[in-house]
Amino acid sequence: MIRLLVFLAVVFALGLGFAWLADRPGEMLVTFNGYQYQVTLMVAAVAIVAVVAAVMIVWWLVKSLWNSPYTISRYFRVRRRDRGYQALSTGMIAAGAGDGALARKKTKEAAKLISSDQEPLVNLLDAQASLLEGDHEGAREKFERMLDDPEMRLLGLRGLYLEAERLGDRNAARHYAGRAAAVAPQLAWAAESTLEELTERGDWDGALKLVEAQKSTRQIERDAANRRRAVLLTAKAQALVDSDPNAARTAALEANKLAPDFAPAAVIAADLVIRQNDVRKGSKILEAAWKAEPHPDIAELYTHARPGDAVLDRLNRAKKLQELKKNHAESAMAVARAALDAQDYATARREAESAIRMDRREGAYLLLADIEEAETGDQGKVRQLLSKAVRAPRDPAWVADGVISERWAPVSPVTGKLDAFTWRAPMERLGQLIDSETDIPVPAITAAPAAPAEKAVDIVADAAVEKPVPTNGGEKDKAVAETVDETGTIGQGSELPHLPDDPGVAPDEAAEKSPRRFRLF
């Protein structure tokens, strides 16, 4: 476009020049070799322009003839290169489609037309063709040769990393990932694998530096980086609690600042602060975390922050937590436990029943059984509550990749993934759970009249479920186990065993009463 405009401008200028000369007549006289030549200005101007144009044309012809060998060779070289890139493009598409034969054919064709030194993608296509043909040893050799080329080094490390992952050699895979992360921390696959290696061996400082590098390269968002730093700092604080309490306290406070709603960070930060006799600051940390998300560990530490407190003082602190988060099952459970310790059975029972109404789960029934045993000692009611606890959903726990843990851990023991544990109810019981509209209050069990016939209910349980963690002491777990026969199933077609103080049912009434049948599978 610019050349066209320049050409038009030159033509326009020449036209103006000739028009100007035409309006101003004159003559030009030239004496040469004894002869005089007289022409008009217009003729002289046209002759000069014609001579200049002829000289330019002659120069162009001479230059073209002089450069013709290079021009011809360049034409064939460009044509050969275009054919090579076409073969390379077709081969890459074939490799992506899984056509190993076509990929190998186009690899050979591209290698003939294009030098691998000029186009590194030929090496990549060659390695991909080897993988498609099942020649993994050859592919690894090609990836190793790429390590000598600075431009192909990361690609070679990526290929070797994937091959090590395929073979299950995690050490080799992490070695290649570490080399790649040292050169380019913005690579997600390299950074994640290196992060897993650092956390597995407990190098929390190295993991923190890597997360900071990921944040600086904008590989991860700011919120995600803060979350990872909070997890790593919490793990660091846990590791330094005994050896370096001051460093552990600094790391825990920073983790709590980055993620105030992260319960493990709040608990360890508050615990370390309380150990240094700063109960007020530790209580504020726990209160802020409780407002964000109530957790039983927070309630336990908060109510026992001052070891010399009486049981009534602990009950008051539990009630203060309840005021911060009303209408929540954890708040009611915290008050119920503290009230049970204070022997305020009315409050304990009321809060435990409230917790069941808000979130029906195993721990609430076990706590209610503790209250019943401490207050009345009625083994019939206790047994009924324990039976309901067996059928109720499990309490929340730290779960990661199918592993249920009592305590939080920074990485998954199965995959090594950072921040894998989440606080939730384990998904272990399948099928319909028993619901009762008369769960609360619990009716008294008497032996005088015959109980009405009950409908048989099936409880579906997972065969591979781990044993629930005791939350209310071994006494109640033993009592729960007594409701299950020695073969691991609740009696199919057999009656539940009686406790020593349970009067049971009269023999003549047993024939009239339909049996309760349960089935676990």
Image (cartoon, rainbow, N blue to C red):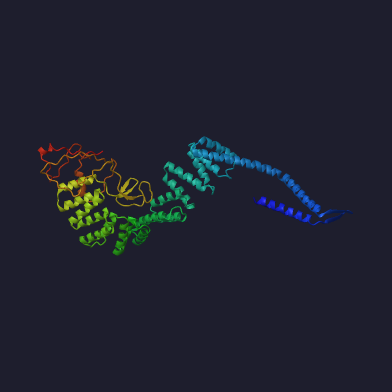
Taking 346 as reference, is 165 left or right?
A: right
Seen as rendered, the residue at the extreme top is: 101
User: Could you tell whether 117 is left or right of 187 in the image?
Assistant: right
Instruction: Say whether residue 473 is visible.
Output: no
Q: Find residue 132 and report its horizontal and vertical position in percent.
A: 49, 37
User: Residue 183, image x and y in percent?
Assistant: 49, 52
Work out which quarter of the rendered image holds the C terminus and state it.
top left
Q: Where is residue 269, by image quadrant?
A: bottom left
Q: Pinpoint residue 216: horizontal percent, then vertical percent.
A: 46, 56
* Residue shown at the point (75%, 55%) measured from the top left: 17
* Foreground pick, 271 / 457: 457
Say if 217 sits above or below 463 in the image.
below
Residue drawn at x 38%, y 46% is: 415
Q: Percent x, y for residue 7?
A: 69, 51
Q: In this view, which residue lies farthest toward the front? A: 23
Residue 196 vs residue 73, the one in the foreground: 73
Say which quarter of the image contains residue 215: bottom left
Left or right position of 192 against 305: right
